[in-house]
Image: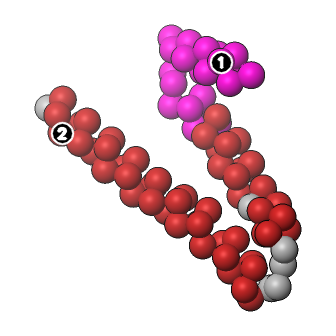
Amino acid sequence: MRRRVYLAGVLCTITTGFAHFSDIYSLPIHFLVAYQKSALAAGIALLPMLGSAAIGSVIGGKLSGGRRNNNFLVTIVAAE
């Protein structure tokens, strides 16, 4: 049972990571070619997506952590 749960977590992480990686790679190129933006402007255009992903990760971690889990506070303190 433990191995199946671990495998499901790994597969979920890989599929989610692939989607984020393709967005982070292809969107700036799209902004450069289609909208004729500079490299700096294309990078700045990613900030709302990256910020919302960070906030969503914190909220999701807090919601899934339960009441007895202090990993949320440790992660926030370690990130600063």
Residue type of the residue flagged with mark 2: Arg
Q: Which mark is residue 4?
A: 2
Residue 33 colored in magenta in the image: no
- Residue underneath mark 1: 78
Res 42 → quadrant: bottom right
On screen, residue 30 versus residue 61, left or right, reads right
Tell me where residue 71 sits by quadrant: top right
Label 2 sits on a secondary structure element that is helix
Q: Where, quadrant-wise, is the C terminus in this rendering?
A: top right
The disc placed on residue 40 is none
x, y percent for residue 29 = 67, 76
Residue at 56% x, 12% y is: 70
Q: Position of residue 68 (x, y in %)?
A: 51, 11
Q: Is residue 37 above or below residue 67?
A: below
Look at the image and tell me whether residue 27 can be seen.
yes
Q: SS class of the residue under badge 1?
A: helix
**Residue interval drawn in magenta:** 59-80
C-alpha gap between disc 2 and disc 1: 30 Å
Residue 31 position in % (x across, y down): 75, 78
Q: Earlier in the sequence, mark 2 or mark 1?
A: 2
Vertical relation: 45 (above or below) 33: above
Query: Which of the pair 5/25 is nearer the observer?
Result: 25
Picture mark count: 2
Q: Is residue 45 in view?
A: no
Neighbours of disc 2 within 10 Å: few (<14), some (14-19), many (20+): few
Specify the amino acid type for callout 1. Answer: Ala
